[in-house]
C-alpha cells in the first residue's frame, strides 16, 4: 500500500486530465474521511497543490480540464485519513497529445 502516486508526462507529449475518480472505504463499512492532494510541478517551476477533501464513502467523479506539458510531474498524496482501517483510491482519466 502506498500513500503517493506519481506520473511524469512523456517527452514530446502534452497531457489533459479530464476526470478524477476518488473513493474512500472503511473496513467497518461506516463513514470515513480522507484528504487527497493533487500536486503538480511544471518542468521549470515549483510544486502547486490542489486539495480535494472526501468526507464520506461515496464515489467522487470530478470533471477537470487540467493541461500538463512534457516533463511535468503529477502526484496524488494522501496525508491523512480518519483512522487506520480507511482505504482511498484515486484514478484519473487523461489524453496524451503528441508534440511534433
Image (cartoon, grey):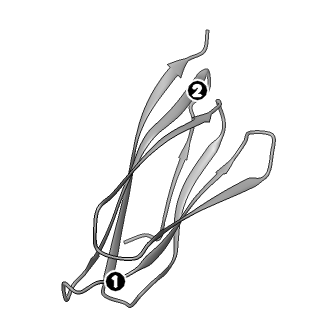
For this rendering, which residue is in front, 4 or 78?
Answer: 78
- Quadrant location, the C terminus: top right
Q: Is residue 66 left or right of residue 17?
A: right
**Mark 2: few/some/many CA within 10 Å (<14, 14-19, 20+):** some
Residue 98: image tag: none
**What residue appears at the point 61 percent right and 20 percent down from the top-left corner?**
12
Which residue position is annotated with label 1? 32
- As drawn, 96 above or below 23: above
**Mark 1: few/some/many CA within 10 Å (<14, 14-19, 20+):** many
**What residue appears at the point 66 percent right and 59 percent down from the top-left corner?**
49
Element assignment for label 2? strand
- Quadrant location, the N terminus: bottom left
Tell me the mark number nearer the camera, choosing from 2 and 1. Answer: 1
**What residue appears at the point 48 percent right and 26 percent down from the top-left corner?**
96
Q: Residue 24 occupies which quadrant of the picture?
A: bottom left
Which residue position is annotated with label 2? 14
Q: Residue 66 occupies which quadrant of the picture?
A: top right
- As drawn, 67 above or below 57: above
Element assignment for label 1? loop
Q: Is residue 40 left or right of residue 59?
A: right
- The answer to whether marks 2 and 1 mark residues whose Cβ atoms lie closer than 8 Å is no
Q: Residue 37 occupies which quadrant of the picture?
A: bottom right
- As drawn, 9 above or below 39: above
For this rendering, which residue is in front, 98 or 80?
Answer: 80
For this rendering, which residue is in front, 59 or 88?
Answer: 59
First in sequence: mark 2 vs mark 1: 2
Residue 3: x, y in percent? 47, 71
| C-alpha gap between disc 2 and disc 1 | 36 Å
Residue 35: x, y in percent? 50, 73
Amino acid at each position: 500500500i502506498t500513500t503517493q502516486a506519481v506520473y511524469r508526462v512523456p517527452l514530446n507529449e502534452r497531457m489533459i486530465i479530464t476526470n478524477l475518480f476518488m473513493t474512500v472505504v472503511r473496513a467497518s463499512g461506516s463513514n470515513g474521511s480522507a484528504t487527497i492532494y493533487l500536486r503538480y510541478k511544471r518542468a521549470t517551476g515549483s510544486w502547486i497543490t490542489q486539495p480535494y477533501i472526501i468526507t464520506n464513502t461515496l464515489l467522487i467523479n470530478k470533471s477537470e480540464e487540467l493541461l500538463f506539458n512534457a516533463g511535468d510531474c503529477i502526484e496524488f498524496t494522501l496525508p491523512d485519513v480518519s483512522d487506520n482501517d480507511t482505504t482511498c483510491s484515486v484514478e484519473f482519466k487523461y489524453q496524451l497529445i503528441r508534440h511534433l
